[in-house]
Image: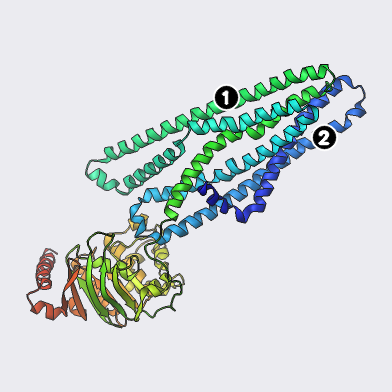
Amino acid sequence: MTLFLRLLKFLSPFRWQVALAIFLGCATIASNIALLGTAAYLIAAAAIVPFLVLLTLPIYIVRFMGVLRAVSRYAERLVAHNVTFRLLAKLRTFVYSHIEPLSPARLLAYRSGDVLTRLVADIEELQHVYLRVISPFIVAVVIAMLTFGLFYIFSPVLAWIALAFLVATGLGVPLLVGVLTRGLGKRQLVLRAELNAQIVDGIQGVQDLLACGRAGDQQQKIADLDRALGQIQGRMALIAGLQQTMNDFLMNLALWTILILAIPLVATKVINGVYLAFLALVILASFEAVQPLAQAIQFLGHSLAAAERLFGVIDVAPQVLESAAPLPVPGGRTLEFDDVYFAYHPGEGEVLERIAFVVHPGSRVAVVGPSGSGKSTLFRLALRFWDPTRGTIRLDGQDIRKYALSDLRSVIGTVAQDTHLFNGTIRDNLLLARPVASDSEMEQVLEQVQLSEFINQLPNGLETWVGEQGLRLSGGERQRLAIARALLKNAPLLILDEATANLDSLTECALLDALDVLMRGRTTLMITHRLIAMDRMDEILVLDSGRVCERGTHSQLLAADSLYRRMFDVQNGMLALEKQEK
């Protein structure tokens, strides 16, 4: 019930349109009842009334009700679907706005295919809440009372009999269907989400599956899920057929019962004989209002299951919360980590301990160390994707938690090892950094990252489509484009997280020469395991097992018997070998 009430809140901005649609729905069925009832009366009366003038009013009523029924049905569909589509648009925006702050910390618990299913398929299921659940129930109640009143004029007994059959069809059959389909709607949504997740996983990892010879296993998983989903859908289709059969049976039974009880009333002159056909067609027409209710129960189950999945994500509290009274936009000149500890999950071991350093305005600090030492975690903490377990991160002397997230990130230019390129043009991906950037500015940063010559040789230049995740470009080209995007942002603080990881050593050295010019005047934090051009850094921090084990300049660290020196000797030897091979 709580889920249903939460869904109803989304209808409040459209309450007048909803009321209009319900009114039009009632008018549609009421006009159909009037049309069939009057037509039956007209045919019966024409057989015994010789004067056409006495049939003029029924003739006009039939014509009017026929037109009214068509107009009301069209208007009801127009208004109802307009409200539904606007509601779905509002729901998508609402759900996405709540999911976005959960990234990346909270979304690690969900598969990308499952999140996609919640945003698309589950929201689509909610359209039935209004179209197939709320409106039909209200219309059914109104029409049932209208039919009861109409029959009561002729006979209270017939009125109660008619109401009993309408209630049996509108409540009894739906309750039986609800028992038969209990849990099927939720199971169907879960299977569909798992199927979508497996398909997405299979597409994303198709190269690895083919290389490992496991594509058949993935296909079998998808086939098994599809088969299980088909079985549930088949069972629901069988129940839907049973429900329709019961509806038809009750409708025909109601017709015969009314006729059997009304004929003696006609014989005793309690009811005029011309109204016998009228009553028969009225009871048939009134079933149009109650027959959809059995299916509405199924749709209600689906919708509540979808709502449970959606609110299950929406109700998750973000790991990082916005400041209630954010400070003005920071200048982004000084970055400080003050005794920072961090663990990704409560109760687990801390991946960072006692991290303390300052990146002063315009200075360059490198953080190096073996893989798994916690370097990239610093990158995520600086951007507030996570907050420290203990300690404080400051920007311009203020705790970064005091700034609005958008303001904080607006003064930080970033390049990560796994920077995402969107499935658009080169221009589109560059303009993400600064939508108002000119072509000359884009060409300038492309020149600085040594990518302009490559792009100029492309037939479409900046309009070249990069493909899904930039797969039409090489790894090095993707990384250079990501660096160009960060440079175009022109933020005062630059954080590079393995920015040159996908480049060979010689190209990396050339790119670092360009970066050396671009980093002048910017506060720079470089996170890397590649010890190239470290002599250009003002300070180097060496991380090992989440702690700063060494710090100093390049020359100071080389002069000592240090982890840094051992790493440098190994990488220097590999670089020399690579140059010889070239």
Amino acid type, residue under disc 2 in the picture:
Ile
Q: Coloured how?
A: rainbow
Q: Does dot 2 land on a helix, a strand or a loop? A: helix
Residue 163 appears in view: yes
- In this view, 164 is above or below 321: above
Proximity of marks 1 and 2: CB atoms separated by less than 8 Å:
no
**Foreground of the two, 181 or 471:** 181
| Residue 329 x %, y % | 43, 78
Q: Position of residue 494 (x, y in %)?
A: 32, 74
Q: Residue at x 23, y 67 (%)?
A: 352
User: Splitting the image into 4 quarters, where does residue 471 fall?
Assistant: bottom left
264 sits left or right of 521 in the view: right
Q: Is residue 520 left or right of residue 312?
A: left
- In the image, residue 577 lies at what x, y percent? 10, 65
Which quarter shows the C terminus?
Answer: bottom left
Query: In the image, is residue 82 above or below residue 55?
Result: below
Residue located beneath label 2 in the image: 61
Mark 1–mark 2 distance (CA, rounded to whole Å)? 33 Å
Q: Is residue 374 above or below residue 364?
A: above
Residue 317 position in % (x across, y down): 41, 59
Q: Is residue 5 above or below residue 452?
A: above
Q: Nearer the viewer, residue 144 or 23?
A: 144
Name the mark on residue 245: 1
Q: Earlier in the sequence, mark 1 or mark 2?
A: 2
